[in-house]
Image (tube, helix red, strand yellow):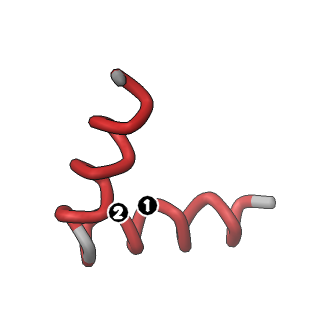
Amino acid sequence: MFKKTLTVEYQEVKDPTQERFHGRHQLN
């Protein structure tokens, strides 16, 4: 479980553009 959370955090930092797009989609 902890490993999964770490991977998600790392992916977010590695791909900031994806996070922005995801956030925009959620906001929309």
The circle on residue 26 is: none
Residue furthest top as drawn: 27
Left or right of residue 8: residue 28: left
Observer-nearest residue: 28 or 16?
A: 28
Which amino acid is tagged 2? Glu
Q: CA distance from mark 1 to mark 2?
A: 5 Å
Dot 1: what SS? Answer: helix
Nearer the camera: disc 1 or disc 2 = 2
For the residues labelled 1 and 2, say whether their Cβ atoms are less than 8 Å apart.
Answer: yes
Q: Say if 20 sits above or below 4 in the image.
A: above
Observer-nearest residue: 12 or 20?
A: 20
The residue depicted at 69 percent of the width and 67 percent of the height is 4
Which amino acid is tagged 1? Glu
Q: Say if 12 sits above or below 24 in the image.
A: below
Number of residues whose C-alpha sits closer than 10 Å to that of mark 2, classed few (under 14), some (14–19) or many (20 or more): some
The residue depicted at 52 percent of the width and 64 percent of the height is 8
Question: At which x and y percent is residue 27?
Answer: 35, 22
> Residue under circle 1?
9
Residue furthest front as drawn: 28
Q: Quadrant of the N terminus?
A: bottom right
Question: At which x and y percent is residue 24?
Answer: 28, 36
Dot 2: what SS? Answer: helix
Which quadrant holds residue 28? Answer: top left
Left or right of residue 28: residue 14: left
The circle on residue 12 is: 2
Which quadrant holds residue 15? Answer: bottom left
The residue depicted at 62 percent of the width and 58 percent of the height is 5
